[in-house]
Amino acid sequence: MDDIEAELNIPQAQAESESSEDERIQKTLKPPGLLHVCRESGFHKSVRLCLKAMRDAMLHHRWQEAAQYLAAYSQSLEDSTTQKQLIVSEIIWRLGTEILYHHPNSKLEDFNALYERMKNSGVKNYAKICLEHSFHLLLNGHFHESKQQLSVAASWRYGKQSATQSLLLKLIHAYCGFLDYFIWCMKRSSVAKVGEMMLLSNREMHTYFRQASVTLQQIISQPGVWDPFILSYIDMLEFYNDQEEALNVLQNYAYNKDYPANPNAHVYLYQFLKRHNAPNIKLIRTLKVLCSLVPSHELILEYCSLLLNSDVQEDLQEALGVAMNLLDYTSWKTNVNAWNCLMNILKLLKIIIFKKCILYEMKNQIAFVVLKLTIIQDQASNGERPIYSKIVSEILFQIHDSEKNGTKYPELFCTNNTKKVQFFFSGCSSFYTGTYLHKRRNKDFMTPNLEYDRPSFFMVTPLPTRRLVLFIDSRLAGLQPQC
């Protein structure tokens, strides 16, 4: 076992030759080393250190020091390598705008100079820089200069148009229409002038409306998320009382399956319908879709309120589920309005359940009660008025639903020959009680000439035995209650 070569029948000469060959190969192999060594020049090293120092100054909000490093770093644009020029120009563009934005002594001219230099340094970023320059001018109130920058960017072409350039040009075209809308708003605010100036302003205003509407209509007809452009177009349509077109645009933006799911589209549609006093069923339908997309949206409380005011019973159950789901979110757990909404829903559900139980008992157990009472008339002497000690009448109590002041109450009808007296009674804390107090010389009840020494009453109460007990004052009837 110790001699492996002998066991494998390998000759000794062959073994020695193999070992010598391995040694020869190891001697010929060179030790590993770096094949590509990056030899950094002094200029590139200075540029790298300058960029690092500028980054540290920005992180510590030393903006004046960062501006000095930026001026030194701009010398790297003289690098002859094209790829490095593109990288350096984008770095100067991004960091330069950030530094100028936070610099205490920066001016609009400094921004304009930086943007113009960066446009000529990197042609591939020309359209993006023009778009950002337009935004900066727009924030400073220079609408016409901003529109000019967008017009220049829209006409820019470089090489073969790629998909990215196509999307960028589409966005630039959209913001051109958006700026036309801003100028239209400025003209609208000055419409209050009278005479020829007002007529001239209206003409200019309508011109910008046509330009903006054509551009925005082309943009929003393509699938995408176009929230600011949709709002601009709807504002102009509402100003010219074209509510039908505005509604069609919003419905297409919200319900078109080619567009991505966008909760804001349903919010805009709901706000438009609410402004124009749309029926509650349309508002509920719109907010229902919004609730399915964003169950914790701030409009969900309005959705619950609309469901509570609905006459459909299923809407109340839907409101309960929506309110319970809303309170599961952390942002709503401490909201008092959300808990009050849930409390109102539970109160309505409790009333409906009680009413169903009451009506069921009345319908199946105490639908009709007939009492037959007798009257004895004592003729008085000397021409005095007769005294009625007992009453002869047939009283029929029938229970059904009625409506009073928009609220449903059970109703009692008391018939005395051709007379009918109507009584209302409502729920109490225990279960159900109705009470009526007779007034002195009440001519609407029983006999017109009947007088009472004290008030009489009756009370209707469903008992556990499901029997209706009618109490009639003994001075009025002189009889025991009958059921």
Image (tube, helix red, strand yellow):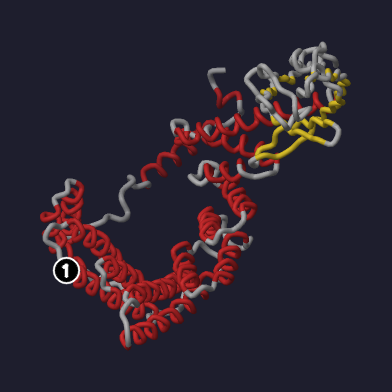
Q: Who is closer to the viewer here, 190 or 403?
A: 403
Q: Who is closer to the viewer here, 438 or 116?
A: 438
In the figure, is residue 313 to the left or right of 110? right
Please provide percent x and percent y for residue 331. Answer: 45, 36
Tell me the quarter of the image containing the C terminus. top right
Q: Residue at 64% across / 52% down in the picture?
A: 281
Q: How many marks?
A: 1
Please provide percent x and percent y for residue 54. Answer: 17, 54
Quarter where residue 71 is shown: bottom left
Q: Residue at 69% across / 36% down in the picture?
A: 408
Please provide percent x and percent y for residue 409. Answer: 70, 33
Please provide percent x and percent y for residue 45. Answer: 17, 57
Q: What crowding class fits label 1: few (fewer than 14 Cα within 10 Å), some (14-19), or many (20 or more)?
A: few
Q: Who is closer to the viewer here, 34 or 374?
A: 374
Label 1, secondary structure: give it. Answer: helix
> Which residue is under mark 1?
110
- The residue furthest front is 382
Image position of 293 with respect to 345: above or below: below
Q: Residue at 52% across / 74% down in the picture?
A: 217
Quarter where residue 258 is shown: bottom right
Q: Residue at 59% across / 58% down in the picture?
A: 278
In the figure, is residue 448 to the left or right of 220? right
Q: Is residue 226 visible?
A: yes
